Amino acid sequence: MLIVVKPLGVLAILVRRPVWLAELAYAGMFFHLLLAASAHINAGDGGYPPALIGVALLLVSFFTQNAARAVPSAVVTEIRGA
């Protein structure tokens, strides 16, 4: 199931129609990467850096999405106070 949902999440972020679906995809990817990093840290296998890098890149993408897209996100605008 994840092999289908993950690419659809990327597509939802790129297309951004409807905006709420893109924001839901951001949330799903954020929690997936955060829990993956947590699992690697708890397992002690040292495989957590790629997941943390993914979280960082996802956050950068989320907070810069309004500058790059024609359809603005209401959530990011409220966070920045604009």
Image (cartoon, rainbow, N blue to C red):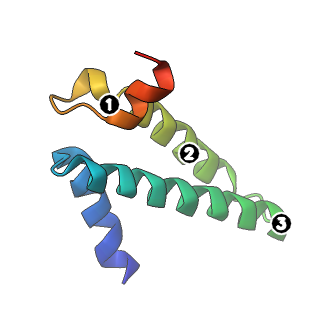
Locate residue 15, reporting x and y percent. 16, 47
Which quarter of the picture shows residue 32? bottom right
Which quarter of the picture shows residue 82? top left
Crowding at mark 1 (Cα within 10 Å: few <14, some 14-19, many 20+): some
The circle on residue 55 is 2
Residue 2 as seen in the image, left or right of residue 21: right
Residue pictured at 24% horizontal, 25% vertical: 68
Q: Is residue 62 visible?
A: yes
Residue 43 as seen in the image, left or right of residue 27: right
Q: Is residue 44 visible?
A: no
Extreme bottom residue here?
Answer: 1
- Amino acid under label 1? Gln
Q: Secondary structure at mark 3?
A: helix
Which quarter of the picture shows residue 21? bottom left
**Nearest to viewer (mark 3 / mark 1):** 1
The circle on residue 33 is none
**Is 62 drawn above or below residue 29 in the view shown?**
above
The circle on residue 65 is 1
Residues under labels 3 and 2: Cα distance? 17 Å
Residues under labels 1 and 2: Cα distance? 15 Å
**Nearest to viewer (mark 1 / mark 2):** 1
Which residue is the site of mark 3? Answer: 42
Residue pictured at 73% horizontal, 61% vertical: 38
Q: Nearer the viewer, residue 11 or 77?
A: 77
The N terminus, quarter of image: bottom left
